[in-house]
Image (spheres, grey):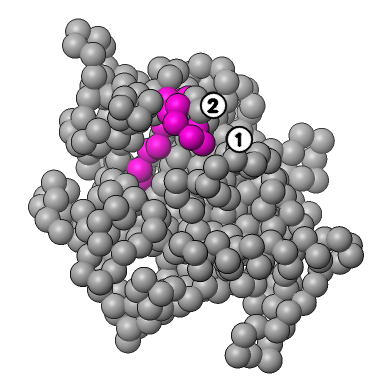
Amino acid sequence: MKLTKYLFRMVLCLATACTAIGSVGYAQDSGSENKVTMADKTIHAQPSYVLSNSQVELAVTLLGGHMAPVTFYRDTSEPIQPYHISPWQEEKGPEMPAAVLVPLRGDFFCMPFGGNSEAVGSEKHPPHGEVASSPWIRKVTERAGSVSHTSMTLETTARVGKVTKDIYLVDNQNVVYTKHTIEGFEGKVPLGHHATLAMSEQENSVHLASSPIRFGMTYPGVFSDPKQGEYQSLEPGKHWDSLAHVPVAWKGQKDADLSRLPARQGHADLVQIYNQPADAHQTPAWMTATFTDKGYVWFSLKDPSVLNSTVFWIENRGRHGYPWLGRNHCLGLEDVTAYFADGLKASVEPNAINQQGIKTALELTKKTPTEIRYIQGVVRVPQAFQVVKTIEFSPGQITLVSPDGQRVSAPVNHDFLNTGKL
């Protein structure tokens, strides 16, 4: 913890100095002759790298590699910024209870995914791993043809290895392509993306849908503890087949409809859905959130053989301890292979999910790097388009189809999930 704080203060000071002189600064990478850039900007209190083209601009924090804000449709009169930025970013207060909360925003990579409250052998990881709370070093930002690209690295110590984060934008697409390359690690680990969306204020205005699932399950323990000023609304440990019918904690009350949010203000809940296995055609699994009050669909695409589930963090002002203070309002749609958000120990040991033959951790090996490829984007839709029923995939394009047959297409190089290339 002390080392992380020191590194963060060092990076912050360097970034502030660069901002003060109005230009991007340079420093020598330790042990290398290659130059790496410092922060381009300080955005919502966090020194950040910036990547952009005509359609999209995104910022990635040095600390933890959190991606937000992201502006889609930036070349139009109504740009879209779908990602959440925690409300305490501009504040000065006590030390955060977890380092990942310092920059908390948008989408970030987690490994090991979850709280990691218990050690496994000699390994003790911070919540969501060092990759979500330590400084990333940018190595390159470049443009080749229609593709803009930035690459950054982080070397870990709790389990020794190296992770490279590559982010790509393609001209004329409102899409972000991400690839994390994991090298030098040995053993099982839960991991994935922690995409966190800003939630609308209008009740039931955000309509959720996913590709076919095996089943869903509410968190089996106490996710929001009243002893800590936290409150949850869903009954723990229940299996279900549809987001529209999830048991609540109160006897005699009808099931919650998690396909329509926000709802149940004053509560924070956690559930997980498990995707159907990958098909022979390598069709991506998908998750969508249709913001009916704002006229757009946020989507994520993944390979379900790599990231086999989605954790929903439904935060509707349900936590009152520091730094939440009853004000945090967001929706995490976190594509992972993990056992809920319990971390390394719970995910690698026998649990209620892997005993059903569903992986809750990936096996990493020093001999072969592992790539985690992921796609996120936004599609503007007409007012009558209320929810996604299915997504059709054709070369270089996806088509969102509503239950009443409306169709909206957008350019997306979804084969990136198979090839890692654009």
Q: What residue did someone put label 1 on?
A: 87
Q: Secondary structure at mark 2?
A: loop
Q: Quadrant of the C terminus?
A: bottom right
Q: Residue at x 30, y 74 (%)?
A: 364
The reply to whether discs 1 and 2 touch (Cβ–Cβ < 8 Å) is yes
The range drawn in magenta is 306-324
Q: Position of residue 150 (x, y in %)?
A: 65, 69
Q: Is residue 175 left or right of residue 284?
A: right
> Could you say which quadrant of the image residue 170 lies in?
bottom right
Q: Amino acid at mark 2?
A: Arg
Determine if the magenta segment contains residue 41.
no
Q: Residue at x 29, y 41 (%)?
A: 273
Q: Amino acid at mark 1?
A: Pro
- Foreground pick, 238 / 149: 238
Q: What residue did someone put label 2 on?
A: 327
> Between disc 1 and disc 2, whose residue precedes?
1
Q: Is residue 347 left or right of residue 257?
A: left
> Could you say which quadrant of the image residue 147 lies in?
bottom right
Q: Secondary structure at mark 1?
A: loop
Q: Residue at x 76, y 57 (%)?
A: 41
> Could you say which quadrant of the image residue 209 lies in?
top left
Residue 160, which numbered label? none
Determine if the magenta segment contains residue 320.
yes
Is residue 290 among what the camera can see? no
Q: Position of residue 293 (x, y in %)?
A: 61, 22
From what the image shows, is residue 197 above or below residue 235? below
Q: Residue at x 74, y 68 (%)?
A: 14
